[in-house]
Amino acid sequence: MYNTALDPQKQPTVKQMSRMTDISIVVPAYNEEARIESVLLNFCGRFPEQEIIVVCNGCNDRTHEIVEAFHSKHPQIKALHFNEKLGKGGAIIEGFKAAQGESIGFADADDSVEPDEIEKMFAALANADGVIASRRLSKSIITVQQPFMRRFSSRAFNIIVRAIFGLNFKDTQCGVKVFKKEAIKGVLPSLTTKGFEFDVELLWKLSKGGCKVVEFPVVWKHSQGSTFSLSNAPHMFFSLLKMRFCK
């Protein structure tokens, strides 16, 4: 089940949930020294007790040092350090394996979606197995648009995904998604893609498993410094074709 949009105004807040500490947020980080401090400050302000796992993979800058410094002051922030570059998907998979919360999510290290929006998404898990941020619902708000070519390629990618996988989500690639732990445990051993196409495989396998995943309108802004490049598109496309038809 999928593609049911939730109304954020009708959802409870995380503070109304019974066990606030049973939340884990995975943040994949590759050379994010310029903005990881701001990201972690925002998360600590909204999620002072929740587990935040930063997966530093293949970094050749100070990202890991900055995260470790935060850990000394904020014990709920944990750093996983891998010398090799795992890719976005690979980093999230490692974060999922380490997560202790009953609700598990991931968020890009770019502040495109503010923590208060993520809090609403976790609260919305009361009505679903998974909640994914969407920039393309009627109640979504875009405060800073992506460059034209990024918007064009994103919509083209979405059309391809719909055609190949039968997923009717309007936005599979927005960088914040949250799930019940049981849903993730059911698909985690079968996840194979390691790049930016990871989101599609995750949503496809959850839907195949009968999980209810819904889109959630968020306030979103484009952030400079993204590690994604349009040059990744061919690899994403062929990786998805291999995953879909060669197994």
Image (cartoon, rainbow, N blue to C red):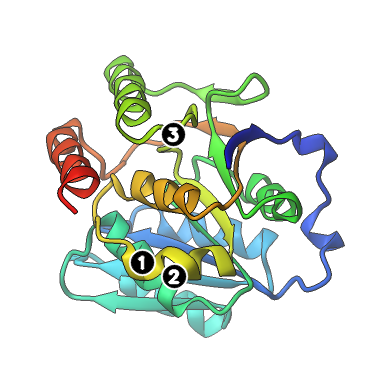
Seen from the viewer's position, the closer of residues 24 and 73 is: 24
Q: Quadrant of residue 66?
A: bottom left
The kind of residue on which mark 1 rests is Ile
Q: Quadrant of residue 188?
A: bottom left
Numbered circle sitting on residue 96: 2
**Residue 187 percent coordinates (x, y):** 42, 64
Q: Do the residues labelled 2 and 1 touch (CB within 8 Å)?
A: yes
Q: Is mark 2 on a helix, strand or loop?
A: helix
**Residue 81 percent coordinates (x, y):** 29, 77
Which residue sits at x=49%, y=80%? Answer: 71
Give whichever of discs 3 and 1 has the lower sequence position: 1
**Residue 200 percent coordinates (x, y):** 36, 43
Vertical placement of residue 152 versus 20, above or below: above
Assess disc 1: are there few (<14), some (14-19) or many (≥20) residues with their C-alpha within 10 Å of its C-alpha: many
Q: Could you tell me which quadrant the N terminus lies in?
A: top right
Question: Residue tagged by mark 1?
Answer: 93
Which residue sits at x=64%, y=34%? Answer: 4
Numbered circle sitting on residue 41: none
Figure label count = 3
Q: What element carries label 3?
A: loop
Assess disc 3: are there few (<14), some (14-19) or many (≥20) residues with their C-alpha within 10 Å of its C-alpha: many
The Cα–Cα distance between marks 2 and 1, rounded to whole angstroms, is 5 Å
